[in-house]
Image (cartoon, rainbow, N blue to C red):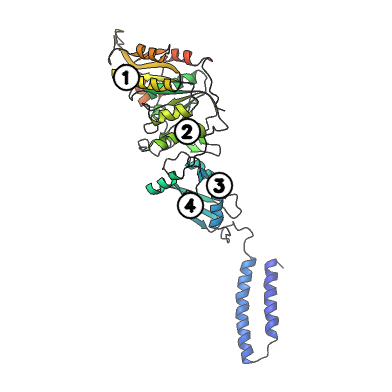
Amino acid sequence: MTAGSWNTHLVGCCWATCCSGLPNTGASNSISCAATRITSTALVLWTALCSAPSSPAEKGSVVLITTGQILEVLQKVVDPELGHNIVELGMVRDLAIHPGGDVSFTLALTIPTCPMKDHMAFNARQLLTTLSDVNKVEITFGEMTEEERKNAFSMARPIPPKLNAFNKIGKVIAVMSGKGGVGKSSLTALLAVMLARGGKKVGILDADVTGPSIPKLFGLPAGGLRGSAQGILPAITPLGIRIVSTNLLVPEEDTAVIWRGPLISGTIQQFYNEVLWGKLDVLLVDLPPGTADAAITVIKNLPLSGALLVTSPQQLAALVVRKAVHMLQSLDIPVLGLIENFSYYRDPQTGVIHEIFGPSHAGEIAELTGTSLQLRLAIDPALTGLCDAGQIEQADTTALEPLLALFLPASIAVSNSN
């Protein structure tokens, strides 16, 4: 006899014994009938209890986990930028427990493109599935209202930046310009390509948060970044160049990133500290034009080996790049070299050089910086076409070779990024 049938038999016997001692009267018949009905009900309930699955996580079982227990576990998941757990920040919404032990909730983000959203969701799933009553965890992403976002940021207690334990980064070099439109991102990408071809392990941190173009140059699709238990996983090109950019977070290539200074600064630091870069010989940081928040964040918070300046022959470009020079000098960041892009056009038929954008200012700016390296690069329509097509890794040029010889030797200090 099984445990279930034995218990059913026991209940039936108890009720039969109880009823058999009653006098044979009308009242006793009523009681007997009532007892019979109660016995039938008891048998049904007892049988149901005895036949219930032994594991509450099985389909159709009674789930004993409570929302309080789930929220208690989720308090261990911390937003790295704000330094508080996701429950305290009010990020956990629409929490539901479903039959079979399935749990679902919405994670309300401060910004839809939060670079750590997958990382936080991964941690939440890992923690919740350790509970014996939880079977599956489904997490959807939502967004806070403007008022909720302000409240969350007012609570901010950022975790001190700490480089991912899996990373070992050699030289960190900023590539910057005074104004936009001088080809700074294209030269950053081209430099990375030439370094990779030379056997170097290279990464690009696209710090131009609101106007990123690095992914486009390499033909990388939007939304290409993923999180793991170790950190954010960078996109990797065919040549092995590791890239992180806000355009790899947004769902569409033309999605605008409308962020203010603190968010931009926080994102750049997260990209450096929390991306799983691994072992790199060189990390190139593509800065936005000018000397605003992004440039200040990189210079003050990243262990820079130095900076490369990109300009063009126009007097306005030369004027603005001088401001970048003064900022670097005031913060004791060495200028490794100056690149004047679009410096001239060489007629392929006659070889005659035409200074389309005016005479060069490279010499006077290089003298101001104290660098011995100055490169004047010609306008190259073929390179422009490859950039537009997302095929910069196919570029056939040696234009930056003098630069490689000057800024890669061991004479340049190696950043201690461990």
Q: Which residue is mark 2?
A: 269
Q: CA distance from mark 4 to mark 1?
A: 53 Å
Report how far apart the C-alphas of labels 3 and 4 lie in the structure: 16 Å
Above-or-below relation of 344 to 290: above
Which quarter of the rendered picture does the C terminus lie within?
top right
Query: Of label 4 and label 1, which has the lower sequence position?
Result: 4
Q: Residue at the location (64% across, 92% down)?
A: 25
Q: Which mark is residue 105?
A: 4
Residues at marks 2 and 1, CA–CA distance in whole angstroms: 29 Å
Q: Dot 1 corresponds to which residue? A: 319
Residues under numbered marks 4 and 1 in contact, where contact means CB atoms less than 8 Å apart:
no
Rounded to the nearest whole Å, what is the CA distance between mark 2 and mark 3? Answer: 23 Å
Q: Is residue 2 left or right of residue 285?
A: right
Q: Residue at x 41, y 48 (%)?
A: 148
Alpha-carbon span between mark 4 and mark 2:
29 Å
- Circles 4 and 2: CB atoms closer than 8 Å: no
Residue 55, position in %: x, y? 62, 58
Which callout, 3 or 4, points at the residue further toward the start of the chain? 3
Sequence-wise first label, 4 or 2: 4
Residue 76 numbered mark, or none? 3
